[in-house]
Image: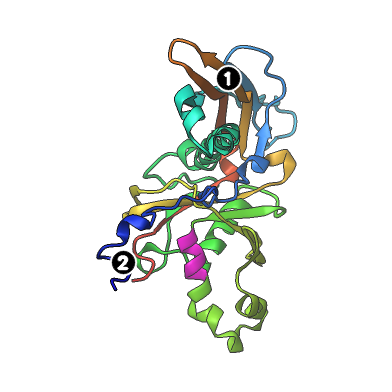
């Protein structure tokens, strides 16, 4: 008697492919940069806003019974423009809705996925506003301290010394030593977690908590403070950069940013002229449902004295 054996005479009795009703979602990174933006409120119309600035008063020597010398205080103008008008759109045809057994779940995902895509673009824009507002390939020196430099470690990787240099630059620019934030690339986190002076806690006991529990415990926030900076990790920093500053070059670099997030001195200003807005309609000519989400916004570096960019090489972190 013949039996039933896979690969011979019984394959037509087995369904070759089975499809689950579940949908596999892509893992998403956490978005958080918007909380570090000073949102403009007095921008009623148009797309360009001018903000006036005034400098400090000057002190001069005075001689008795001599005329007083009068000096004008420096003034300036900061121009802010709404630069970005973004859209995310998709559709589903009637035939697809009729034939697909996961149609309801697909359609239900359109709006949240479009909203997420736009918020991701906004996150990238915010995190790039600081470095892009500085002069590239320049040290952007303020009060004698560099606000843009290449990481000082071997192979241009960030070390603890770079945190100290960033703190020094902010101190020299009179930035208050409160709410200081460092947003760094994942490669920097790896570097910090494997530095010899952090791993060997026998000579550095204040770092013991980091070694025992890891740098990151809840979401993106590191559980320890480095030279006054609360350190956050983001994959949305400006990357793929090639730049030379003070004869030191970096290739495949990423722009790690350091600043104070004190409310009155936020380094980035921004405006959401139109937050993500959803429109949907039925297109009778194409026999399909169309969904589109649009947003209009702008972000710009407002206080260069409160922004330090450290360029580190992401491709050589394991070298």
Mark 1 packing: few (<14 Cα in 10 Å), some, or many (20+)? some
Of labels 1 and 2, the one closer to you: 2
Task: Give the residue at x 59% y 87%.
Answer: 203
- Determine the secondary structure under disc 2: loop
Q: Main secondary structure of the magenta part?
A: helix
Residue picked out by circle 2: 6
Quadrant location, the C terminus: bottom left
Q: Does the CB distance between marks 1 and 2 fall below 8 Å?
A: no
Real-space Cα separation, disc 1 to disc 2, in angstroms:
49 Å
The vertical placement of 215 against 307, above or below, is below
Whether residue 73 can be seen here: no
Report the residue that reaches farthest toward the left: 8
Residue 169 is situated, as x and y percent measured from the top left of the image, at 56, 53
Whether residue 208 can be seen here: yes
Residue 229 is situated, as x and y percent measured from the top left of the image, at 64, 59
Quadrant location, the N terminus: bottom left
Q: Is residue 4 left or right of residue 219?
A: left
State the count of labels: 2
Q: Is residue 215 magenta?
A: no
Q: Which residues are magenta?
A: 186-192
The vertical placement of 261 against 218, above or below, is above
- Determine the secondary structure under disc 1: strand
Residue 272 is situated, as x and y percent measured from the top left of the image, at 63, 26
Residue 189 is situated, as x and y percent measured from the top left of the image, at 52, 65
Task: Give the residue at x 49% y 47%.
Answer: 236
Task: Give the residue at x 70% y 55%.
Answer: 177
Residue picked out by circle 1: 280
Examine the image and state in which quarter residue 110 appears.
Answer: top right
Examine the image and state in which quarter residue 275 appears.
Answer: top right
Q: Is residue 66 left or right of residue 113?
A: right
Relative to the observer, which residue lies in front, 155 or 144? 155
């Amino acid at each position: 008697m013949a039996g039933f054996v896979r690969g011979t005479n019984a394959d037509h009795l087995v369904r070759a492919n089975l499809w689950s009703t579940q949908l596999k979602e892509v893992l998403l990174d956490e978005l958080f940069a918007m909380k570090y933006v000073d949102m403009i409120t007095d921008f009623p119309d148009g797309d360009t806003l001018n903000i006036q600035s005034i400098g400090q008063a000057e002190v001069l020597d005075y001689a008795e019974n001599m005329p007083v010398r009068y000096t004008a205080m420096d003034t300036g103008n900061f121009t802010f423009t709404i630069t970005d008008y973004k859209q995310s759109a998709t559709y589903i045809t009637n035939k697809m809705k009729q034939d697909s057994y996961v149609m309801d779940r697909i359609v239900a995902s359109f709006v949240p996925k479009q909203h997420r895509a736009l918020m991701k673009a906004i996150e990238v824009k915010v995190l790039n506003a600081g470095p892009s507002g500085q002069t590239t390939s320049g040290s952007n020196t303020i009060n004698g301290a560099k606000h843009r430099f290449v990481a000082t470690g071997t192979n241009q990787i960030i070390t603890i010394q770079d945190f100290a240099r960033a703190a020094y630059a902010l101190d020299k620019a009179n930035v208050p030593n409160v709410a200081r934030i460092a947003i760094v690339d994942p490669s920097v986190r790896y570097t910090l977690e494997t530095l010899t002076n952090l791993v060997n806690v026998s000579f550095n006991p204040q770092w013991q908590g980091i070694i025992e529990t890891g740098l990151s415990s809840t979401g993106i926030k590191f559980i320890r403070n480095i030279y006054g900076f609360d350190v956050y990790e983001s994959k949305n920093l400006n990357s793929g950069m090639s730049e030379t500053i003070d004869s030191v070059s970096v290739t495949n670099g990423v722009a790690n940013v350091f600043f104070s997030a004190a409310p009155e001195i936020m380094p980035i200003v921004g405006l959401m002229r139109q937050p993500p807005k959803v429109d949907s309609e039925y297109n009778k000519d194409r026999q399909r449902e169309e969904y589109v989400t649009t947003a209009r916004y702008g972000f710009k570096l407002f206080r260069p004295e409160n922004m330090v960019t450290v360029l580190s090489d992401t491709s050589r972190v394991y070298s």
